[in-house]
Amino acid sequence: MTRGGAAGVRRAFAIGAVSLVALLGLAGTGAAVPPPPPNPSDSELEAGREAADAKAGEVGQLTNRLAEAQSRLAALQAEVELKMEQANKARVDLQSARAAADQAEADAAAARAEADAAAGAIEAARADLDRFVAGSYRQGSTIGSIGAYLGAESPDDLLARAQLLEAVSSSELDALEDMQRAQIEKSNKDAAARKALELAEQRRAEAEQAKTAAEQAQAAAIQAQQGQAARTSELEAEKSRVEQQLYEAQSRVDGLEGQRARYEDWLAQKEAEEAERARQAALAASGGSSAPAPSAPASSAPSSASVESVIARAMSQLGVQYAWGGGNASGPTYGIRDGGVADAHGDYAKIGFDCSGLMIYAFAGVQALPHYSGYQYHAGRKVPLSQARRGDMLFWGNGGIHHVALYLGNGQMIEAPYSGGYVRVVPVRYGDIVPYATRLIG
C-alpha cells in the first residue's frame, strides 16, 4: 500500500470513528487502536529489494572470482613446491658432479704420474741396455760377434760363453719390452683419465647451469605466488566489503518489510475495531444485545499447511533449468554472468533458478529471503541436523556455505543443483553438509 493510500485510510478511519461515537455516545467502547506505524511505499520496498539483489549478485560474482583466485593460488603453491624440489635436485646434482670431477682429476693425475714413471723406467732400462751393447761391442762380445768366442779353451767353454751372452742379452731385451708394454698401458690409462676428466668437467658445468636455472625458476614461482596471494587478499577484502553492503541493504529491506508488516497488522486491528463498533452501533440501534463478538485469534506461527504450501511451490518448479543468479519470489528469471562456469553453460541466457533463488520462491509467502545461501542460513532458527523436519533448509560447505536445498522428509530433498542441471528431488547428500538446518516455519 502507498503512503497516499495509508493517509486515505487514516482519514476514513477518523471520519468513521467520529460518526460511530456520535451514533453511540460510547467513545470509550472497544480497545483503542494505536497510531499507525510507518508504511513504506511499494516503490521503496522494490528499490530496497533490487539493491539487495544487486549486492547479492555482486557477492556471488566475487565469490566465484575469489574461488578462482584461491584455485590459482593453490596451483602456484604447488608450482613453487615443484620448483623448490627441482632446485634441490639441481643442487644435489651439482654436488655429485663436483665430486665426480674432483675424483676424475685425481685419477687423471695418478694416471699421468704412472705414465711418467713408466717412461722414466723405460729410459733407464734403455740406457742400461745401451751400455751393455756398447761394452759388448768394445770387448767383441756382442751377439753374433766372433770375438766373443775367441780364447775359448774348449768346446764346452765356447758353448758356455754363447749361452751366457744369449741369456744376458735376452733378459735385458725382455725387461725392455715389458716396460714398453707397461708404458703403453699407462699411457692408455692416462688418455682415458683425461677423457673422463673432460667429461666430468662438462657435467659440472652443466650442473652449474642447471642450478642457476632452477634457482631462477624457483624465484619466479615464488614471486608469482606472492603476487597471486596479494590479489587473493584484495578479493577477500573486496568480498567482505560487499558482503557488509549486502547485509546493510538486506537489513534495510528487512526493516522496510517489518514496517509494512506492522502497518498491515495495525490496519487489520483497526478494521476489526471498526467492525466491532459498527456491530455495537447496529445492536444499540435495534435494541439487541451488546455482547462483544469473539475477538480474532492472535496470530501464531505458520502451521503445517504453510510448510506444505512452501513445498508445493518448490515442487511446482521440478524440471526447471538451473540458472546462476536466477529466481525470485515471482518465479524463475534470467541468470547472470559469473565470468566462469555459469557463463560456460550460458546461464545468463537461461530462465531458471539457482539454489538460493529456488528457496526465495518457495518461501515467498512466508518470509523474504536474500539471494545468497550464506545469509539464508541465518534467516531462521537453527536446529540440529538430526532434528530436521519437512520444510527445513539444508546447507553445505562447512568451510563456507555454497549450497542450499529444501528438506522433504524421509531423507529426500529438492534442489537447484548446478549449471547444466535442473530442479530435482534427490536423496540428501551428507558429505560436507552443515550440521544444522534452518527452520523458518514452526
Image (cartoon, helix red, strand yellow):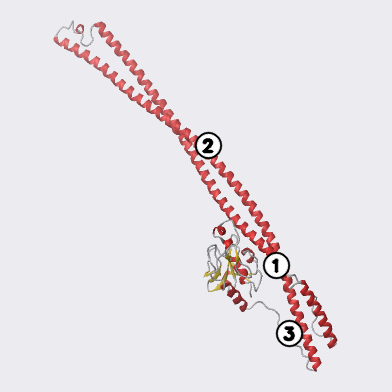
Residue 212: mark in rendering: 2
Vertical comparison of 280 with 14: above or below? below
Q: Which residue is mark 1?
A: 46
- Among numbered discs 3 and 1, the one appearing first in the sequence: 1
Vertical comparison of 238 with 432: above or below? above
* Amino acid carrying mark 2 in the image: Thr
Q: Residue at x 75, y 80 (%)?
A: 269
Q: Tell me the quarter of the picture where residue 190 sits.
A: top left
Vertical comparison of 161 with 78: above or below? above
Q: Residues within 10 Å of mark 3 (few under 14, many from 20)?
A: few
The Cα–Cα distance between marks 2 and 3, rounded to whole angstroms, is 89 Å
Nearer the camera: disc 3 or disc 1: 1
Classify residue 247 as left or right of residue 123.
right
The Cα–Cα distance between marks 1 and 2, rounded to whole angstroms, is 64 Å
Q: Residue at x 56, y 71 (%)?
A: 317
Q: Residues within 10 Å of mark 1 (few under 14, many from 20)?
A: few
- Of 165 and 438, the residue lying toward us: 438
Residue 248: mark in rendering: none
The Cα–Cα distance between marks 3 and 1, rounded to whole angstroms, is 34 Å
Q: Tell me the quarter of the picture where residue 244 sits.
A: bottom right
Residue at the limit of the structure toward the left, as seen here = 155
Can residue 437 be seen in this snapshot? no
Q: Residues within 10 Å of mark 2 (few under 14, many from 20)?
A: some
Q: Tell me the quarter of the picture where residue 294 sits.
A: bottom right
Q: Which residue is mark 3?
A: 295
- Of 43 and 131, the residue lying toward us: 43
Nearer the camera: disc 1 or disc 2: 1
* Amino acid carrying mark 3 in the image: Ser
